[in-house]
Image (cartoon, helix red, strand yellow):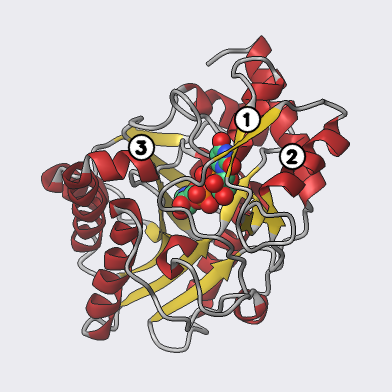
Amino acid sequence: MGKILVTGGTGFIGSHTVVELINAGYEVVLVDDFSNSNPKILTQLETITGKKPDFTELDLCDERKVAEFVAAHPDITGVIHFAAFKAVGESVRFPLKYYRNNFYSLINLINAFNSNIGLVFSSSCTVYGQPDQLPVTEDAAVKRAESPYGNTKQIAEEILTDTCAVTPDLRVISLRYFNPVGAHESALIGELPIGVPQNLVPFITQSAIGKRGPITVFGSDYNTPDGSAVRDYIHVVDLAKAHVAAIQRLETKKAEGNYEVFNLGTGKGSSVLEIIQAFETSTGEKLNYTVGPRRDGDVEQVWGDVTKSAEGLGWKAELDVNEMMRSAWKWEKYLKDNPF
Ligand code: WQD
């Protein structure tokens, strides 16, 4: 088994992936700058896995420090690169902050490994915009992103495609996430939004626990069965397991070429109102919500075709929306009694 570097390893998806890598027998090295995560996650990971994480606080935008770190870890056999800014709204207000951070970190990482590494890249379904056809497949047109955040994902994929085209020793798998939600069954790790949650599910759980007021449903006049927007919500633990499968694919070098893309979703769409209903049914908690105007930049409906992921990664999401809601609620209740 190899030693995998997880950048952004104390973040929401990073931390869950660390657990699944260790469960699969890998040694893991974590780096993070805590710009969007909490150091306490390291203690939580040790409690869950029984292993003290090998962690280094590192700013991936510092080219010299990244090169020094990689030189000091010659036994790293693969990388999963999560570390990036990811708040859609913030990216509109501070585009240069997003372009600098998300590209400097990626380029420094590839250079530090002399482009000779297997790398799993955290991408997003945002690159599809509003697809012309649903479910959306990996070869669908990539549309002009609605936000600088989404644009950083699109351009990062182009950086990787162009570099892989002239660097056979760089093997990359880009994973396009749909909507990651939920938390580890232990409720010791989960989503830790800073300030008012922008995403639906953390807002729901904070509203249910009394930390926020009623939920605003952003739009009920979409051309969808109940008028609210549709997304492909995927349990973060299923998402984490897909990253292990991607590392295994890179190791077996079964890839067709040295750059591949896979959708990570369930292949099923759920509307905002269906998610609210699923939360109430699966937790027994009553939610208060109002219907407001559409949110700028939102697409109407998107869900993924996951055929290629099933065939190429030998992976399929297993946890349903009810388990997503139950685990998210269990995590929110844990946070109330154990504030970070
Ligand atoms: C989901 C739906 C909202 C809050 C974004 C990024 C994507 C990924 C996930 C990183 C939408 C509605 C939300 C609320 C609401 N991030 N909503 N009331 O925008 O689909 O995706 O986060 O990879 O890249 O783009 O997720 O959870 O913000 O919204 O009605 O208070 O819930 O309008 O229809 P989104 P979201």
Position in image of residue 197 (x %, y %): 50, 31
Work out whether mark 1 precedes mark 2 in sequence or the reverse, and give the earlier one.
1
Is 36 rendered above or below residue 21? above
Identify residue for label 2: 276
Mark with earlier residue (3, 1)? 3
Q: Residue 59 vs residue 87: left or right?
A: left
Residue 246 can be seen, yes or no: yes
Dot 3 lies on which element?
strand
Mark 3 highlights which residue? 32
Residue found 47% across the figure and 45% down from its top: 295
Disc 2 beta carbon < 8 A from ligand 1? no
Question: Mark 1–mark 2 contact, CB under 8 Å?
Answer: yes
* Residue 303, percent from left and from top: 62, 66
Residue type highlighted by circle 3? Asp
Question: What is the CA distance from the residue labelled 3 to the residue labelled 1?
Answer: 32 Å
What is the C-alpha distance between the residues marked 1 and 2? 9 Å
Residue 108, image x and y in percent? 19, 55
